[in-house]
Amino acid sequence: MDITNFTEHYDSKEQYDYKMFVYGNYTYRDNLEADSLVEVLRNVIPYLNKKYKIHFTLMTPQVIKSLSFPNVHQEIYALPSYCNTMRTHFDAIKFLDMIDWRRNDFDIIYSHVPEHTAQIANALFNNSNLRPKIVGYSHWFEVPQNAPYEKTMFDSSMLGLLEMEECGVNSNWLKQLVLKHAQKSFNPKVIARLEQVIQPHYLGVDQYRPRAKGIMPKSVIFNHRSSGYTGWDNFVKLMDKLWEKRQDFLVYTTLAQVDRLWNRKIDLPTRTEYINFLHKIQFGVACFQSYSAWSISVTDGLSVSVPYLLPKDFCYPEMVPANYPYFYTDEASFLTNFETMLDSPPNYSTAAIAQATTWDNRIGEWFSGWGKVFELDALKSETEGYNSVVKIIKKSGYIAKKDLLDKLGWGVRIKWSPYRNLMRQEKHIKFTKDGYEWLQS
């Protein structure tokens, strides 16, 4: 397996009280830096680094520069890119090879692919000595509104959720949609459990920037993909209709493109360039018709004072205050509001929205403040085996996990995680990436 990674900076003796394995779903392969999961992780990792000493292992299809933090190892593992095929594809052999449980400890599995989480739990609990806490996050479920194909992995994703203590979703709207579809296959007892597991984890925005000077007149941004669920085809029809009436506006797109005089696609290789360009736009649009979970493209604009014309549906009423003025309910109100925003540049301040939803503020609310995520099950009391573990570490000074297990003669049948978690109370033992160090008094 190709595990080349030039981003490793840790020292073998550096303290890491926790080790987290992040199992990811990276869908935007054309530019991984623009992928929604990358956007989430590049904010979650620094936030957790302020609170805990953690070493992260990320499963990624290639090295992602913006996730190259000193305490992050990126394990190269390319899942299929087509969404449904990716959700069907779990390779237990490769997964266990990545985990390498004789050498590695993982206290927490942070899964972003619910469809694989039941397999992850089975692979770990039946083929390793690890008993990690499993939590997750998912912004996408295969429901008819966004996956109009013959077979989906929705029921498998529900089974994965049941293996988690908590799984974040990006809005209460999405939670209720998932529960509604789950009721078609699962009994009330399971639905009650899913209702406990699934919790809104609202996404954040970058640091707020006041309205830019030199806004490009009559400029509009459509910074979403050209997929069916984004309403792109219908948006093109509406713009064609408006263009027949007036030819004084320009719609900029970042991911979609159409051969029209009113459209100009921009290619911005870095997020900084993208945000700087977005800052100059007069207003943005969201045209989702049948489905829309939390839109990072919208919050990107709100963070730089760009108001958006939004559907009064889906997750959007959760994203903005109740008195937000730029909602539409149908095509007619969309065009009316669109023209109003063209002719009377919006002066609505997004400061209250953006400042309240900065990443640190939002992430700090997830998992009820994260404390329970790091409450790990330990042995109830010191046993003969536990005392042997401590004695070996003390005698060795420093010992890698693999060498420690070899000295103990322990294999897959002895659950290692409870021993490790009880060792957290030993003031003389320091946890490192690969092993344990005895600290002299």
Image (cartoon, helix red, strand yellow):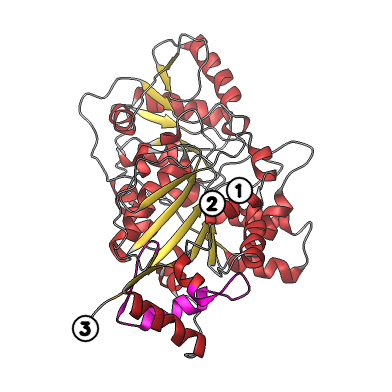
Which circle marks residue 98 in the picture? 2
Instruction: Give the structural element (helix, strand or loop) at label 3.
Output: loop
Q: Which quarter shows the C terminus?
A: bottom left
Q: Residue at left 48%, top 75%?
A: 376
- Amino acid at circle 3: Ser
Compute the Cα span from label 1 to label 3.
42 Å
The crowd level at tag 2 (other Cα within 10 Å; few <14, some 14-19, many 20+) is: some
Q: Nearer the viewer, residue 6 or 145?
A: 6
Q: Residue at left 65%, top 54%?
A: 178
Lower sequence index among marks 1 and 3: 1
Q: Residue 143: x percent and y percent?
A: 69, 45
Compute the Cα span from label 3 to label 2.
36 Å
Report which quarter residue 211 is drawn in.
top left
- Amino acid at circle 1: Lys
Which is in the foreground here, disc 1 or disc 3?
3
Q: Residue at left 53%, top 74%?
A: 416
Q: Residue at left 71%, top 53%?
A: 156
Pointer 1 residue: 94
Q: Is residue 247 positioned above or below 139 on the image?
A: above
Q: Give the magenta-colored segment's residue range.
A: 407-434
Which is in the foreground here, disc 3 or disc 2?
3
Report which quarter residue 67 is drawn in.
top left
Pointer 3 residue: 441
- Amino acid at circle 2: Met
Q: Say whether marks 1 and 2 touch (CB < 8 Å).
A: yes
Residue 249 on the magenta span: no
Report which quarter residue 32 is drawn in.
top left
Q: Nearer the viewer, residue 281 or 183?
A: 183
Q: Nearer the viewer, residue 409 or 56?
A: 409
Instruction: Give the structural element (helix, strand or loop) at label 1.
Output: helix
Q: Nearer the viewer, residue 128 or 350?
A: 128
